[in-house]
Image (cartoon, rainbow, N blue to C red):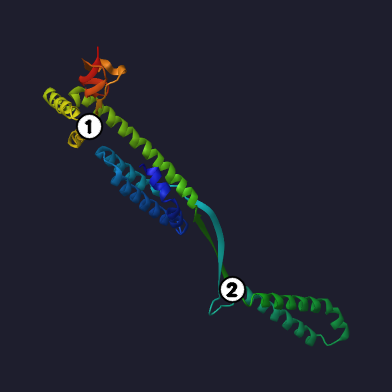
């Protein structure tokens, strides 16, 4: 069982948890939680302590780096406008300026009309009066435009980036594949080291131990119909297998691994004890001439 398989088995649940994550921070927490779950399940099925220790370190590193994972989906930008009006609004300076100019022009026009009683004088003063009236009206108009200031408007822009669940899953999937590859390299190295150690130490068995097993096997093979003999052979086979040692039955191809006894029929009287191609103890077989 590797981490890739564990992640694939939990794919649907994990995707749902990411879909419901409101932001990248929540998605990161879900990734950390998934990595912890994978590590727990992995350790339950792994027997190699060196691999377990390496897996813990790798998952811790991946969990710490999950905040850097690219999980951004679609980015939405929207605006918010807030309107504010002053409670006590003061009239601007330009309002009072236009108002004074307006009153001044109109007042001056009235004075001129009163003081120039003659028709001729009034006609001669007409351009001046028209100019004063126009300036007064224009000033009144501009004073009106400055009388009330518009409500203050504040525009605010907000951005929201959704979480892409498929992108998160893909990034996590690539991560666990790389972790599995590193762990498999560690397993291979462990197997090579163990095999070398077993070769150098004959599986950790002394010559006396090997001779003792050979004798027990010969006795058990001598009584093949006895259930106890079959059970003894099974136990010894399993024990030696854990030490990378095999029990090899007689055949013409491996005849060199056996001492032969003359017999019309071929049979294994005692299996050969072999460590990864290295003969530890010759077997005994019938059928030789």
For the C terminus, the quadrant is: top left
Give residue 1's quadrant in the image: top left
Residue 121 image offset from top left, x and y in percent:
85, 82
Tell me: 192 left or right of 163: left
Query: What residue did someone put label 2 on?
Result: 151
Name the residue nearer the viewer: 86 or 59. 59
| Mark 2, secondary structure of its residue | loop
**Quick one: 100 or 46, which is closer to the camera?**
46
Residue occupied by mark 1: 237
Callout count: 2
Question: Is 131 left, or right, of 27 in this rendering?
Answer: right
Visible in this render: residue 138? Answer: yes
- The vertical placement of 22 against 86, above or below, is above
- In the rendered image, the residue lying farthest to the top is 289
Towards the viewer: 158 or 91: 158
What residue sits 13% from the left and 23% below the top? 211
Residue 65 in the image: state x and y as whole percent. Answer: 37, 46
Percent position of residue 266, x then y: 27, 20
Q: Report helix, strand or loop for mark 1.
A: helix
Identify whether 265 is placed above or below 85.
Answer: above
Can residue 68 be seen by looking at this rendering?
Answer: no
- Determine the CA span between mark 1 and mark 2: 93 Å
Residue drawn at 81 percent across, 85 percent down: 116
Q: Residue at x 28, y 38 (%)?
A: 51
């Amino acid at each position: 069982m590797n981490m890739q398989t564990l992640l694939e088995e939990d794919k649907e649940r994990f995707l749902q948890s990411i879909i419901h994550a409101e932001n990248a921070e929540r998605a990161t927490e879900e990734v950390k939680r998934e990595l912890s779950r994978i590590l727990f399940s992995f350790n339950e099925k792994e027997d190699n302590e060196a691999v377990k220790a390496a897996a813990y370190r790798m998952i811790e590193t991946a969990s710490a780096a999950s905040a850097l994972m690219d999980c951004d989906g679609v980015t939405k930008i929207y605006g918010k406008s807030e309107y504010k009006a002053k409670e006590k609004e003061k009239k601007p300076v330009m309002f009072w300026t236009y108002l004074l100019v307006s009153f001044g022009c109109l007042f001056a026009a009235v004075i001129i009309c009163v003081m120039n009683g003659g028709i001729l004088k009034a006609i001669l003063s007409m351009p001046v009066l028209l100019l004063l009236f126009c300036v007064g009206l224009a000033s009144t108009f501009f004073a009106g435009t400055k009388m009330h200031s518009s409500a203050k408007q504040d525009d605010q822009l907000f951005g929201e980036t959704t979480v892409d669940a498929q992108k998160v899953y893909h990034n996590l999937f690539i991560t666990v594949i790389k972790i599995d590859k590193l762990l498999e390299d560690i397993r291979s190295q462990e197997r090579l080291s163990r095999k070398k150690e077993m070769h150098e130490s004959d599986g950790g068995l002394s010559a006396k131990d090997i001779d003792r097993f050979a004798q027990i096997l010969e006795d058990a093979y001598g009584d093949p119909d006895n259930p106890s003999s079959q059970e003894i052979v099974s136990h010894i086979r399993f024990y030696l297998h854990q030490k990378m040692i095999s029990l090899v039955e007689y055949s013409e191809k491996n005849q060199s691994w056996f001492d032969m006894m003359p017999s019309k029929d071929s049979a294994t009287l005692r299996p050969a004890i072999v460590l990864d191609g290295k003969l530890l103890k010759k077997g005994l077989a019938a059928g030789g001439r």
